[in-house]
Amino acid sequence: MTITITAFEASPDRGRGLARDARVRWALEEVGQPYEVRLVSFRAMKEPAHLALHPFGQIPTYEEGDLALFETGAIVFHIAERHRGLLPHEPYARARAITWMFAAANTVEPPILELANAKILESDKPWSKERLPLVVDRVRDRLKQLSARLGDAEWLDGAFSAGDLMMVHALLRLKASGLLDEYPNLAAYVARGEARPAYKRAFDAQLAVYKADLGAAG
Ligand SMILES: N[C@@H](CCC(=O)N[C@@H](CS)C(=O)NCC(=O)O)C(=O)O
């Protein structure tokens, strides 16, 4: 059955891997599933046809036959459940890997997004400068805890899993801030994720969309 995902027609990060379709592309690459991509504009994302797929008017979505999903955690979980390679078989190890997926989405990503919002959306507010250190500290708290748990392990719990995929992608947003480099084991962990051939294919495919858009515009 054909898998179709949606992605930005013109990604704000210029195709540098931060748009969340990267997670879905990466998961599909890890398990060797081909997929098609439907590009959507910001305007189209808020129109009824897309809202029927994604109630919050965002990307990515995932369609497979009659099934339509949104939320990267749910999509990656669906892919991991149906194909080998992203979740261990042993039930307890599987439950722990799923726990890391939730931890990435619910505990680690929110302060990282808060920082991105503080820098991008709130920088013109009079209170922005005063608030920023608090936001940065909340990110540091999480990184410190995650760094302590990872220690010198390669991945969060045994072999690479969907939990690592979600976590690495959430952490990637911090690369430009330099915060990740304060925790060398986390920086190395993210680099290991980026070095995976499946990640590289996903990244290249996303970047190709941006380059094609540039070509069309030029
Ligand atoms: N929690 C959602 C977040 C989805 C999300 O924030 N998508 C962004 C792109 S990475 C988006 O569509 N932003 C445009 C908008 O919200 O209008 C998920 O993990 O899928």
Image (cartoon, helix red, strand yellow):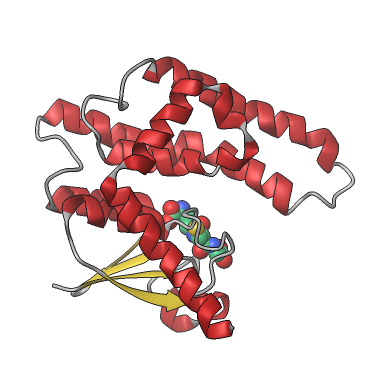
Q: Residue at x 38, y 72 (%)?
A: 53
Identify which residue, 95 or 214, lies in the foreground: 214
Q: Residue at x 31, y 32 (%)?
A: 99
Q: Residue at x 52, y 80 (%)?
A: 215
Residue 39 placed where, x, y %? 42, 76
Residue 188 placed where, x, y %? 42, 28
Residue 101 visible, this angle: no
Q: Is residue 158 left or right of residue 46?
A: left
Q: Is residue 1 above or below residue 23?
A: below
Q: Quadrant of residue 165?
A: top left
Q: Is residue 99 above or below residue 39?
A: above
Q: Residue at x 33, y 36 (%)?
A: 164
Residue 72 visible, this angle: yes
Q: How many marks?
A: 0
Identify which residue, 98 or 83, lies in the foreground: 83
Q: Quadrant of residue 203?
A: bottom left
Identify which residue, 148 or 172, lies in the foreground: 172
Residue 149 placed where, x, y %? 40, 17
Q: Is residue 90 above or below residue 2?
A: above
Q: Is residue 169 left or right of residue 67?
A: right
